[in-house]
Image (tube, helix red, strand yellow):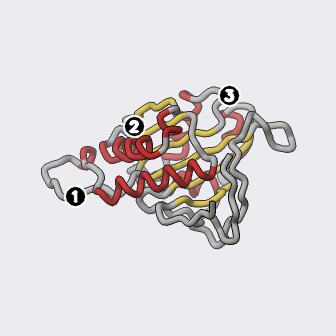
Amino acid sequence: MISFKCPSPFFVSGLNRTTTSCSTAPPRASASPSTLITRRLILLRHAHSSWDHLSLKDHDRPLTKTGQADAAKVAQILSSLGWLPQLILSSDATRTRETLKSMQAQVDGFMEANVHFIPSFYSIAAMDGQTAEHLQQIISKYSSPDITTVMCMGHNKGWEEAASMLSGASVKLKTCNAALLLAFGNSWEDAFALAGPGGWKLEGIVAPDSSICV
């Protein structure tokens, strides 16, 4: 387990608050005071992508060198915080695939997760107010009760809307920012039902320039 010293906030929060908690242990089917299992959801926007190749479709745009480096940084931060996903659900766009590839190259733990590329994650993100419900459906489809941490990789505006709708906060996700959300339930379906809109706790926003104290 990584030991943290935290004289200052260890990750960037997009809210009007900061977080100084140093808990890094992943949930072990352990749970809330009411014995429900902790469910952790990472909503990650893809890293910075290139506009240099005008002949490419938007779906096929690759990452820039900066985007690759940022993805590696965020992977390391998530690993240091103990937020390693067991299940990764990602848009099939080139920039999300390459974001994941850079994260996997940096941290072996991301290689151990089950990965599914979801074509609808690319299109749903452009539709007003539909992403949160769609994420719930896809997570419930691919998850199982023993999976406690899921990462969904996609695009704005949908990812910001979903993080805001689930947490009840106004969440802004720049490229390669990840919203860390927490709820409780004996299954993922239970967690979504019990938390409802606005009931997920926003633990913070991880960004490539987040400062952590090791």
- Measured as percent of width and height from the top left, residue 66 is found at 33, 60
Q: Nearer the viewer, mark 2 or mark 3?
A: 3
Mark 1 and 3 residues: CB-CB less than 8 Å, in contact? no
- Residue at 57% across, 60% down: 205
Q: Is residue 159 left or right of residue 53?
A: right
State the residue in front, 46 or 190: 46
**Local crowd size for mark 2, using a 10 Å CA cut-off: few (<14), some (14–19), many (≥20):** some
Q: Disc 2 to disc 3, how far (Cα)? A: 24 Å
Q: Amino acid at mark 2?
A: Ser
Instruction: Quickly name the residue at label 3.
Output: 145
**SS at badge 3:** loop
Instruction: Quickly name the residue at label 1.
Output: 51
- Residue at 62% across, 52% down: 81
Q: Disc 1 to disc 2, how far (Cα)? A: 22 Å
- Measured as percent of width and height from the top left, residue 13 is found at 59, 66
Q: Earlier in the sequence, mark 1 or mark 3?
A: 1
Instruction: Quickly name the residue at label 2.
Output: 120
